[in-house]
C-alpha cells in the first residue's frame, strides 16, 4: 500500500455524516447540525437539464464554452473580476480545484501557507500533490488575517498562500484592507495567492464579499476557486470553477483530460441554468440564511457560557465552548451521545479550531431549531 494514500486522513467533516448515518441505521433519531441537503433547494428545476442522446459524449476538458462564458459574465457582474473564458476551467467541485491548483504550482516539498483554522480539505490536497501545508493562525480578537504572521512563516520553499473568504469555519468575511495587505505581501515575495470563494453569496447584514481577483497587482499570480455546491445549492452535481492565468488553466485542462476527460455535461447545464437565476436567487438566499443564523444564535445564546459572535458570512456558526471546561472533541461526543445532536468538532479545522464547535445551517429552519434546542438541553450543567 502506498504511504501517500495510507496516510491520507479521512475528512473530519464528512466523518460526522458517517456517524449520523450509522446511528440512524440503528434506529436512533439524530438532529443533524453537521451537514445535509441544502434548504432552500437549487434555483433550477433539475429534470429539464438532463442531457440528450446526441450530447452523450466526452466534452471540452476546459469545461463547455457556454458555461465559461456565463461564468466570465457572472464574475464581472457580481464581483468586478474581469476574466475571459480562457482564464477558467470547470472542475468537479471546488475540491478538485484545490487539488489541481496544488498540482499545477507545487514541486515536491514546496510549502503552502494556509489559515488556521481552515477547511479540512486543504492540507491533505496539498500533501497529496507533494507539498506541505503550513498553518498560520488568524489574529485575535476577531479572526483577522494576520499578514505579519504570514510573512514570518514564509521560507525559501513557500510557493503560495491559500485563503478562503467568506471563511469556513469562522464565518469571517475578510475586508479590503486585510486582503490588500496580503496581496502586497504575495506580490513582494513572488508567491501565488489561492482564494477559495465557495461561500461568495453568503454574506450578511448588508456586507459585501470582496474577491482578491480584483487586485490587478497580483492578477498573474492569483487562482480563484468557486463552487456551485453552496452558492447554488447543487452539492451532488459536483461542479465548480477554477479561475487562473491562461497558462495555469492550460496545465489544468491538460491534467483534466488525462485524469477525468471532462466534467459531466449534465452538471454544467444545471450550473449554467442556475447562473441565469442569480439576480433573484442571491438576495433570497442571503435572507434565508441570515434568518437561520439569527434564529439559531438566539437559542445558543440562552446559555451565556457560549461565546457566540454572529458570523459575517458562510452558513456556519462557530461558537467558542471553552467556558464549558471540555475539549471540542469531548463536547461533540457528549452532544451526540446525550442528545443525538451532531455538530463538528472545531479541532478538525486545525489547532486554532480547538475550543469551538461548528454548527451547520444548511438544512431547513425547523430542523435546525429543533437541533439547537436539543443541544441546549444536553449541555453539561
Ligand atoms: C471552504 C469550502 N470550499 C469548498 C467546499 C466544497 O466545495 P465543492 O462541493 O464544490 O467541492 C467546501 C465544503 O464544505 C468548503 O467548506
Image (cartoon, rainbow, N blue to C red):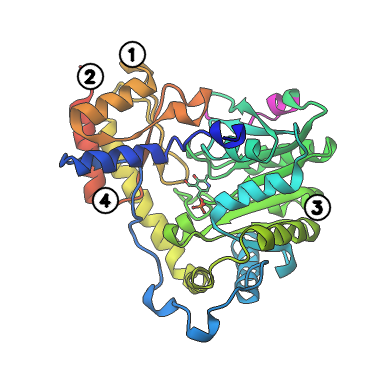
Q: Which mark is residue 220?
A: 3
Query: Of helix, strand and loop, which one carries label 1?
Result: loop
Look at the image and say whether residue 31 sits in the magenta stretch. no
Query: Of helix, strand and loop, which one carries label 3?
Result: helix
Contact between labelled residues 2 and 1, with CB atoms less than 8 Å apart: yes
Q: Is residue 212 visible?
A: no
Q: Is 357 displayed left or right of 30 in the figure? A: right
Residue 101 position in % (x across, y down): 68, 48
Compare residues 68 and 210 and report the one nearer the observer.
Answer: 68
Residue 268 position in % (x across, y down): 54, 70
Gap in angstroms between the C-alphas marked 4 and 1: 29 Å
Is the CB of mark 3 within 8 Å of ligand 1? no
Q: Quadrant of residue 38?
A: bottom left
Query: Of helix, strand and loop, which one carries label 2?
Result: loop
Q: Look at discs 3 and 4 and give the one toward the viewer.
A: 3
Which numbered disc flags the more N-terminal residue, 4 or 2?
Answer: 4
Compare residues 56 and 173 and report the one nearer the observer.
Answer: 56
Report which residue position mark 1 lands on: 325
Which numbered disc flags the more N-terminal residue, 1 or 3?
Answer: 3
Residue visible at 59% across and 62% down?
78
Residue range corresponding to the magenta coloring: 142-151
Residue extending furthest bottom? 54
Residue visible at 43% across and 29% down?
346
Amino acid at each position: 500500500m502506498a504511504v501517500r494514500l495510507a496516510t491520507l486522513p479521512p475528512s473530519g467533516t464528512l466523518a460526522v455524516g458517517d456517524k449520523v448515518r450509522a446511528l440512524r441505521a440503528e434506529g436512533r433519531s439524530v438532529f443533524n447540525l453537521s451537514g445535509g441537503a441544502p434548504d432552500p433547494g437549487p434555483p433550477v428545476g433539475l429534470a429539464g437539464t438532463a442531457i440528450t442522446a446526441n450530447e452523450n459524449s466526452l466534452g471540452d476538458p476546459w469545461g463547455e464554452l457556454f458555461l465559461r462564458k456565463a461564468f466570465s459574465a457572472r464574475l464581472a457582474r457580481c464581483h468586478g473580476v474581469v476574466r475571459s473564458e480562457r482564464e477558467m476551467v470547470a472542475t468537479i467541485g471546488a475540491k478538485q480545484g484545490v487539488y489541481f491548483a496544488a498540482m499545477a504550482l507545487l514541486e515536491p516539498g514546496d510549502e503552502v501557507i494556509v489559515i488556521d483554522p481552515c477547511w479540512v480539505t486543504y492540507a491533505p490536497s496539498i500533501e497529496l500533490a507533494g507539498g506541505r501545508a503550513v498553518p498560520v493562525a488568524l489574529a485575535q480578537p476577531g479572526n483577522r488575517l494576520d499578514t505579519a504572521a504570514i510573512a514570518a512563516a514564509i521560507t525559501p520553499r513557500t510557493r503560495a498562500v491559500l485563503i478562503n473568504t467568506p471563511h469556513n469555519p469562522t464565518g469571517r468575511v475578510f475586508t479590503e484592507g486585510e486582503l490588500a495587505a496580503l496581496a502586497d505581501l504575495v506580490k513582494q515575495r513572488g508567491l501565488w495567492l489561492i482564494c477559495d470563494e465557495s461561500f461568495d453569496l453568503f454574506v450578511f447584514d448588508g456586507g459585501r464579499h470582496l474577491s482578491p481577483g480584483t487586485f490587478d497587482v497580483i492578477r498573474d499570480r492569483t487562482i480563484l476557486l468557486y463552487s456551485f455546491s453552496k452558492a447554488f445549492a447543487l452539492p451532488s452535481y459536483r461542479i465548480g470553477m477554477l479561475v487562473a492565468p491562461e497558462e495555469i488553466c492550460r496545465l489544468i485542462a491538460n491534467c483534466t483530460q488525462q485524469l477525468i476527460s471532462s466534467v459531466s455535461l449534465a452538471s454544467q447545464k444545471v450550473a449554467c441554468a442556475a447562473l441565469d437565476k442569480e439576480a433573484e436567487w442571491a438576495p433570497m438566499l442571503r435572507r434565508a440564511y441570515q434568518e437561520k443564523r439569527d434564529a439559531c444564535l438566539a437559542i445558543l445564546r440562552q446559555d451565556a457560557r457560549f461565546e457566540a459572535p454572529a458570523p459575517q458570512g458562510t452558513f456556519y456558526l462557530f461558537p467558542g465552548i471553552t467556558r464549558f471546561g471540555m475539549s471540542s472533541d469531548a463536547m461533540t461526543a457528549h452532544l451526540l451521545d446525550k442528545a443525538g445532536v451532531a455538530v463538528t468538532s472545531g479541532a478538525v479545522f486545525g489547532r486554532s479550531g480547538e475550543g469551538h464547535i461548528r454548527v451547520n445551517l444548511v438544512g431547513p429552519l425547523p430542523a435546525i431549531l429543533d437541533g439547537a434546542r436539543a443541544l441546549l438541553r444536553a449541555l453539561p450543567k
